[in-house]
Image (tube, rainbow, N blue to C red):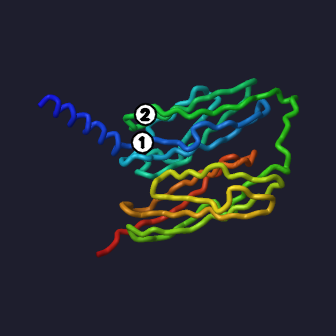
Amino acid sequence: MKLLSIILLLTTLSFTQVVGPKIHSMNSTQDFGTIKQGEVINRYFIIANIGQDTLILQRIMTSCGCTVAEPEKRNLAPGESTKLKAEFNSVGRIGAQLRYITIASNDKETPMFRLTLKGEVVDPSVQIEKPAPTEAELTFPKMQLDLGKIREGDVVENFFAYENTGDKTLEIKDVKTTCGCTVSEVSKKILQKGETGKLKVIFDSKGRLGKMSRNISVSSNDPKEPIKVLTIFVEVLKREN
């Protein structure tokens, strides 16, 4: 009897972890490279709720007064994501920089979730070598896509066009989505100068209702923007019998 009770308790705890809110980031570390002292830089982290209950971002804390962070939204429904803007002020800073952003949330498994912002600050008189303009460059003419209104249970497809507008070979390294309801695949991973491709998006509305957005993170060897974030919007209506 006691053994059965223990098994039931463990099963209940396991189930709670599965259905509860779950915080996740597709880019939990951001490297801003080398900047001159006095510059202010902004970087964006994508925070997603991959759990099955509403995720509440309760507090955002930084390891230094030189860093300010604020999310666009604090309450995320299951599968929903938001951008968190991190601003780093390099005034009075020099050398290697490592700053932490800690998010306190109602995720019981990870109540304190940490993001990392790093880089190097040099004296303003130092010459910084900028990436040559002939590097690979990933360009999306449109970075947001509205799938419109659909009925619950429908599966819809659309695509984002992209192009290598740089001179060197572009390599798409990875594509990630914030929700299992969204699948993305690229037609080409290697593109020469001027070549184009399509990123197909498949959205499955099964078990979902209301207005929602989903993010797609595309990483490549583009030195200026190694991670680009695309957004799809959709409104799922209740299917009438």
Residue at point 29%, 42% (across, down): 15
State which quadrant residue 33 falls in: top right
Query: What is the quadrant of the C terminus in the image?
Result: bottom left
At mark 2, the secondary structure is loop
Query: What is the quadrant of the N terminus in the image?
Result: top left
Q: Which mark is residue 110?
A: 2
Residue 116: percent from left, percent from top = 60, 33
- Image height of 77 relative to 4, above or below: below
Residue at point 66%, 49% (across, down): 173
Residue 213: percent from left, percent from top = 50, 58
Left or right, residue 2 beside residue 121: left
- Image height of 92 relative to 176, above or below: above
- Image height of 235 relative to 59, above or below: below
Residue 54: percent from left, percent from top = 38, 47
Q: Which mark is residue 74?
A: none
Amino acid carrying label 2: it is Thr
**173 or 103: nearer the eye?**
173
**74 or 131: nearer the eye?**
131
Residue under numbered circle 1: 22
First in sequence: mark 1 vs mark 2: 1
Residue 170: percent from left, percent from top = 75, 53
Question: Mark 1 and 2 residues: CB-CB less than 8 Å, in contact?
Answer: yes
Left or right, residue 223 beside residue 88: right
Residue at point 79%, 58% (across, down): 192
Outermost residue on the left side: it is 1
- Image height of 40 relative to 141, above or below: above
Amino acid carrying label 1: it is Lys
